[in-house]
Image (spheres, rainbow, N blue to C red):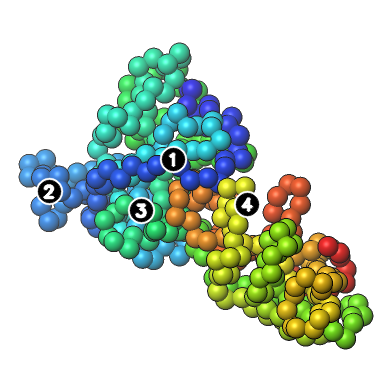
Amino acid sequence: MYLLLILVSCDSSIKLEPAAGKDSAPVETVDDTGVTDDTGVTDDTGVTDDTGPAAPDLGFTLSGAWSGSTLGLTMLVADSLGDEALEFGATRWSAPGATEILLTAGEPPEEDLVPLDPENAPGTLAAFYVPTLHLDADGDGLQNDDEVFVGVGDTWALYIRNLGANMPLPGLVEGWNAIHVDFLREDIRVADPMTIPVDASLAEMSSIALAGTTSVDLPDDSRFGVYPSIMFEGGIALAGLLDEPASESWSFSLEAPPPDDHFSDLDGLYAAVELPLIYQDSHPNERLDDGDQLLHPVCAEGHAVGLLYIPPPTDLVVATSMTIYGIAPGWLATAFDEEGLSPFSADALLNLDIGSCSF
């Protein structure tokens, strides 16, 4: 199965880059009964004139902080599978968030269907759709450029037409299916299309709290500050998020995003990195600037702590990548190593120290 094999063999390091463009074709909305609106064949109860209720094709189960969100089902461009960045097409169906949502999808648009495996299953066509949750400020059912994603499902809807005999993935049927895709483990399996889970795992971590002690002797003019990492890359002076006299015991919390000038492009990810540290205020002027000496970072488990702030994603490629790697937007405390981010637990952040690691 050509496209499905590409799914599990492609490089899991999907780039955190926006797609080239987003199709904003008309979206089919769903009411509380699970029957699509504006079809011309349903009354207020969702019952067709002569044939009885339309049976749902797909079901979705929402979890996490989904309240106020809208479920969307967006086409995945099959040709982008295996590329460094996925590409998405139009959002074809949407519905207001609910614990359980039933969708009568019918047949997908013809332009969404592509050959599944021309060599081993000639004539079999398929279309992939990724379920998402977003905050639909304008109520049109579509995720627009400034509307935030709060969830991306890792179980996708898959429509198959002309199902062939040579299907290496058991359990697929003619019509609507669901497949669970695990990029990191390079695994794919058939799932129940009536219970597709969508978790609001991209809800913003809007605040972060840290506390600890200082185990080394410090000069009298030492100060504790939280400053953006880009200060140490380009020699620019920026205001810190915190600056106070150093002490033996300390605690602080951050409850707002950093200012705009703290952000930079981190390999395709727009984010801010803040460093909690002790410095010697040589001037003194109660702020870190040129001529001050860096003394110690804040430490957790022998590693210097970095505070990463990622804005809530408004691009589906970025939102999908964050979901794959288990990264939520907002504040994240982490060590930075050769393999990437190593986040610390909330408990570890309340038991930090200064003096057990170095820059």
Label 2 CA crowd tier, 10 Å (few <14, some 14–19, many 20+): some
Residue underneath mark 4: 266
Q: CA distance from mark 4 to mark 3?
A: 24 Å
Taking the spot 10% from the left edge, 52% from the top edge, the residue there is 43
Q: Which mark is residue 45?
A: none
Mark 3 secondary-structure assignment: loop
In x, y percent, where is residue 198?
A: 44, 52
Residue 350 in view (yes/no): no
Taking the spot 37% from the left edge, 32% from the top edge, the residue there is 127
In x, y percent, where is residue 22?
A: 37, 43
Residue underneath mark 3: 143
Q: Amino acid at mark 3?
A: Gln
Q: Amino acid at mark 1?
A: Ala
Q: Which mark is residue 42?
A: 2
Q: Which tag, 4 or 2, sits closer to the chain's start?
A: 2
Q: Which tag, 1 or 2, sits closer to the chain's start?
A: 1
Q: Is residue 162 left or right of residue 118?
A: left
Taking the spot 75% from the left edge, 73% from the top edge, the residue there is 289
**Foreground: disc 1 or disc 2:** 1
For the C terminus, the image quarter is bottom right
Residue underneath mark 1: 20
**Foreground: disc 4 or disc 2:** 4
Label 3 CA crowd tier, 10 Å (few <14, some 14–19, many 20+): many
Mark 1 secondary-structure assignment: loop
In x, y percent, where is residue 172?
A: 41, 30
Residue 32 drawn above or below residue 250: above
Q: CA distance from mark 1 to mark 2?
A: 37 Å
Residue 297 in view (yes/no): yes
**Foreground: disc 3 or disc 2:** 3
Q: CA distance from mark 1 to mark 3?
A: 15 Å
